[in-house]
Image: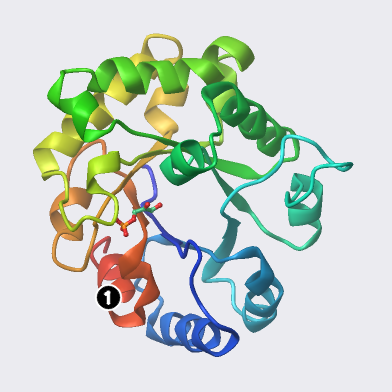
């Protein structure tokens, strides 16, 4: 059985005090019955504080919102996997649609970042997803395939071992417009079948998360679908109560 993952992507949010309250709120609301693997991806500058607050608590893992394909050198503004690893960060989101659209990371950049994360022993959360225009012109599977093939063609299907995929339809991110369970399941199943054609074992094991306006009210339905193994949560991960509802929906 694949363990459900509930990952919070805090994006560019939080102050010293607010992140402290938020992490403590989440930590205090968790209990031994919770089944999900909980991950928080804060802004880099808050990571040290969060890792310190979690030093005596193993129930929340820390992720980065991105990582550089290079280990060190003249790459202003980047964070390397070696640095993240030194600070006990375990997961790295790569290819988030905001990185792709606002910061012009193309499929090849994303694939190289993904590979660097893998090579360093961290776990990548590879984001894929179509825009509304692409969905309405029946391009969803073409786009998802292209985004996955950028990694598979360059580094092989084996690179997806011990990796996580997040399907985040761009039209559902931050819009309050969630994909229905059926819509999400259809794409998750497409992703899993695509991988199965290349490697059945990896396909059976890989966790595929859904992201896009997940909240305490819709998480249970989404997580109940066969190929949905949890969520990558934006806005709702910034409120402890709401995020906890999503975590509990995995029980
Ligand atoms: P929202 O949950 O705010 O729609 O964001 C989803 C997302 O982009 C997570 O990475």
> Which sits in the foreground, 47 or 209?
47
Q: Is residue 175 above or below residue 96?
A: below
* Quadrant in the picture for residue 37: bottom left
**Residue 203 horizontal side relative to residue 109, left or right:** left
Q: Secondary structure at mark 1?
A: helix
**Residue 225 horizontal side relative to residue 118, left or right:** left
> Which sits in the foreground, 15 or 94?
15
* Quadrant in the picture for residue 8: bottom left
- Give the residue displayed 74% in from the left and 51% down from the top: 79
- Give the residue displayed 80% in from the left and 43% down from the top: 75
Q: Is residue 200 above or below residue 113?
A: above
Name the quarter showing ligand 1.
bottom left
Numbered marks: total: 1
Neighbourhood count class around disc 1 (C-alpha, 10 Å): few under 14, some 14–19, many 20 upward: some
Q: Is residue 234 above or below residue 138?
A: below
- Give the residue displayed 62% in from the left and 76% down from the top: 50
Q: Give percent across and percent down for residue 15.
A: 55, 82
Q: Is residue 3 above or below residue 145?
A: below
**Residue 146 horizontal side relative to residue 23, left or right:** left
Q: Give percent across and percent down for residue 203.
A: 40, 24
On the rendered image, what quadrant is the C terminus found in? bottom left
- Give the residue displayed 48% in from the left and 61% down from the top: 11
Q: Give percent across and percent down for residue 10.
A: 46, 65
On the rendered image, what quadrant is the N terminus found in? top left
Q: Give percent across and percent down for residue 201.
A: 45, 22
Disc 1 target residue: 242
């Amino acid at each position: 059985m694949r363990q459900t993952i509930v990952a919070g992507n805090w994006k560019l949010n939080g102050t010293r005090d607010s992140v402290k309250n938020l992490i403590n709120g989440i930590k205090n609301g968790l209990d031994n019955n919770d089944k999900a693997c909980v991950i928080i991806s804060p802004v880099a500058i808050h990571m040290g504080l969060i890792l310190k607050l979690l030093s005596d608590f193993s129930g929340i893992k820390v992720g980065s919102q991105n990582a550089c394909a290079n280990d060190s050198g003249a790459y202003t503004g980047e964070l390397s996997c070696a640095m993240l690893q030194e600070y006990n960060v375990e997961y790295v989101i790569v290819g988030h649609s905001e990185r792709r659209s606002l910061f012009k990371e193309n499929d090849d950049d994303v694939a190289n970042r993904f590979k660097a994360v893998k090579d360093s022993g961290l776990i990548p959360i590879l984001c894929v997803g179509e825009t509304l225009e692409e969905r309405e012109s029946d391009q969803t599977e073409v786009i998802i395939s292209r985004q996955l093939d950028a990694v598979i063609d360059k580094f092989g299907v084996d690179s997806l071992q011990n990796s996580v995929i997040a399907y985040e339809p761009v039209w559902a991110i931050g819009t309050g417009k969630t994909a229905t369970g059926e819509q999400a399941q259809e794409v998750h199943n497409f992703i899993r079948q695509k991988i199965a054609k290349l490697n059945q074992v990896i396909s059976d094991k890989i966790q595929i998360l859904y992201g896009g306006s997940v909240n305490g009210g819709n998480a249970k339905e989404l997580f109940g679908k066969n190929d949905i193994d949890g969520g990558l949560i934006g806005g709702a991960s910034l409120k402890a109560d709401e995020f906890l509802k999503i975590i509990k929906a995995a029980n």
